Image (cartoon, grey):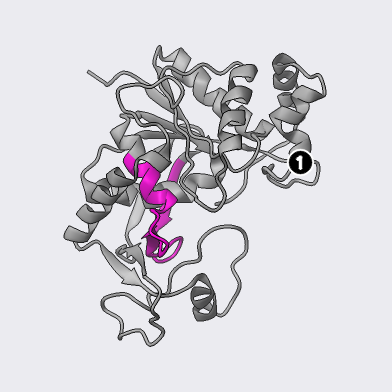
Amino acid sequence: MSSPYRGRLAPSPTGYLHVGHARTFWTAQQRAEASGGTLVLRNEDLDPGRSRVQFTGAMIEDLRWFGFRWQEGPDCGGPYAPYSQSERMAFYRAGFEKLRQLNRVYPCYCSRQDVMRALQAPHAGEEEPVYPGLCRPSAKPAKHQSSRPPSWRFLVADGEAVEFQDGCCGPQRFVAGVDFGDFVVWRHDDVPSYQLAVTLDDAAMRITEVVRGEDLLLSTARQWLLYEALGLAVPAFYHCPLLTDAAGRRLAKRDDALSLRTLREQGLSPDAIRRQWTEIPIARQSS
């Protein structure tokens, strides 16, 4: 017998939510309701440099106004609390320590600039470049070590293929060492990476399907390896097409004119915004 459906909304309080977030989250809510399942709200306030308390309150208010209803979350509690990532650091440290004990991670003293120079070319887009292995255990001792604490990278097996069936985008295949390389799981500023935190959270909160944007397909490949290394059950995935602006660019929090808060102040209703989704161009973007 399969487990009861558990989905999640996982916004970050680094700005006001925009219609792109709302459309993806609405899909998550619809899939949870269609399965008679539970919807979890998780406040992903992990980034100390960008997360803001005022955006957390605005996030919950805007979601409620738009018509979202969750059964567990930072405002209402639940069996897998706390539901704010900033309150789950001990949990992340335990997961990281397990990876260390399994010898699946290693210290890395490279900065992002070091990686870029090693590749001899700038990386287009927002994806982390394929790491060239300067600090890998099999490499010669790095000469660029500094007094700065290291980041810790997850060691992937070059050539290993990660394959999965996405509920929206169909069959996916990514190859380690080609599409992605050793990736950071713990930052030098003593904060877990997005990849590690969401993997541990989704497993701990018993999420059975992760619904999110199509731009995170490659992140799923990385997280798949973490699930396997930690012996965790892998959820199903459903990556939604992205909403873009008139120029074909992915909507982002910098687009304040398309934030739920601004549209609300302009007098638009949630129903009116949802009707407009069919008029906003939807683009599939490669990961």
* Highlighted magenta segment, given as a residue range: 171-200
Q: Check the picture and name the quadrant holding the N terminus.
A: top left
Q: Nearer the viewer, residue 16 or 271?
A: 16
- Which residue position is annotated with label 1? 245
Asked whether residue 172 is drawn in magenta, I would say yes
Q: Position of residue 215 (x, y in %)?
A: 56, 46
**Residue 164 in view here:** no
Q: Position of residue 89 (x, y in %)?
A: 34, 46
**On the rendered structure, is 255 left or right of 58?**
right
**Residue 41 in view here:** yes
Asked whether residue 232 is drawn in magenta, I would say no
Q: Residue at x 80, y 41 (%)?
A: 246
Residue furthest out toward the left = 101
Q: Residue at x 37, y 75 (%)?
A: 133
Q: Residue at x 31, y 70 (%)?
A: 107
Label 1: which secondary element: loop
Q: Nearer the viewer, residue 84 or 204?
A: 84
Amino acid carrying mark 1 in the image: Asp
Residue furthest out toward the front = 53
Please identify the quarter of the rendering in which residue 52 is found. Answer: top right
**On the rendered structure, is 227 left or right of 251?**
left
Q: Residue at x 51, y 36 (%)?
A: 212
Q: 18 above or below 68?
A: below
Please identify the quarter of the rendering in which residue 166 is found. Answer: top left
